[in-house]
Image (spheres, rainbow, N blue to C red):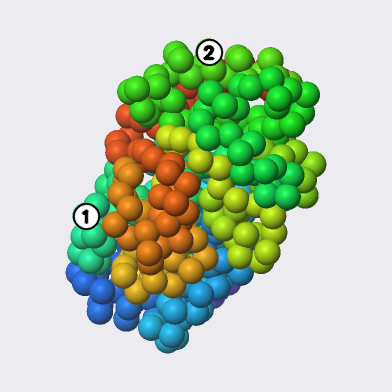
Amino acid sequence: MKRFRRRLCMASVMAVAVVLTACGGPPPVPDTKNLDELYQAAKAEGEVVWFAPKPEAQMKPAIEAFEKKYPGIEVRYTNKKAPDLVTQLNVEQAADRVTFDVSNAGGLTVLPSQSMAAKVDWASYEVPSDQIFADDFVYVWAVPKVWAYNTDALAPNDVPSSWDDLLDPQWNGGKLSVESRGSFMTVWAQDPTLGADAGLDYASRLAELKPHYTENTTQAHTLVVSGQTPVGTDLINLVLEDESKGAPVAVAPVGPTNANKSYLFVADGAPHPAAGRLLTAFLASDEGQSALVDTYNSVIPTNTDCTDAATNRVIGALCAAGVEWFSETDIAQYEQFSDFFPEVEEALGTNVN
């Protein structure tokens, strides 16, 4: 009987051990003080899982550069929309089952992502101070919001060159493709010479033209490239990528605009916390930025600065079109956006959901 009890006790302990192993929490935060120590910890993890709202082809040069610099660490990348990233990470953290290491935040996903980011001393991993945002985010690229036009559909003299030009009656009846969420209006809440109230009035007047509304900016871009709408809201990286392939699309000289900063962060509870930190720090470095710049995804100055126009296509395109830009500088601006965007949707008449 005693032997049976001992066996039962041992079996129970083993069962608990199995359960704890299967259901154990996330790996411990790496106790590393510099990049060399971080690499050794990351190498022991063997891989890093990165989710971001970018085609893998655009991220491939940076991934290859990272894997070359840090052999022994494989990058597993997934293209996933930013709002979906927030939802997935929120669910996974609640279940203590985080499946990815590095996530993306930008626009309206910045505020909800704050509480989901791991606490990291990015300065110890040589991340430039001007790329560290709200302590735990790292600024890695900007994707300025622009207005684009189809070069086959419009003669040079007919291209709109200001926000006011877009209200001309000639664009009435679906000739403008417009992203229905209203993020293209961000600059109105940033630039004091424009102003949020004036922006809401502008959005109401734009709605009177009955634009062709799209669910997202990518869809608006597609309509411009195909010529279905001669002008539309867009993202500069989409314009430059298709323009480089010979598509009839270009940046319209409508400004100012929002530079649309995008940040990476390591998820709290990440399965590979050291590798996640190492990848993020690398992408913020000069070497990482050099790999990103050719796919139009690099850091640009916070506000208008054409110094690097010759070496950075995004800056070059904005400056060539005469478009000034503004970027986010503190978390309070994102709090303002969370109030402003729903009001823009209401003014546009797109707040159906």
Q: Which residue is labeled 1 in the image? A: 129
* Type of amino acid at the residue the image marks with label 1: Ser
Circle 1 or circle 2, nearest the eye: 2
Q: Is residue 115 visible?
A: no
Between disc 1 and disc 2, whose residue precedes? Answer: 1
Residue 225's x, y, as percent?
72, 50
Q: Is residue 122 left or right of residue 107?
A: left
User: Where is 26 relative to 199, above or below?
Assistant: below
Quarter of the image where the C terminus is located: top right
Q: Is residue 205 left or right of residue 253?
A: right
Quarter of the image where the N terminus is located: bottom right
Q: What crowding class fits label 1: few (fewer than 14 Cα within 10 Å), some (14-19), or many (20 or more)?
A: few
Q: Nearer the viewer, residue 89 or 71?
A: 71
User: Where is 122 relative to 33, above or below?
Assistant: above
Residue 51's x, y, as percent?
55, 59
Q: Nearer the viewer, residue 269 or 262?
A: 262
Residue 30's x, y, as percent?
30, 67
Q: What crowding class fits label 2: few (fewer than 14 Cα within 10 Å), some (14-19), or many (20 or more)?
A: few
Count of marks overlaid on the render = 2
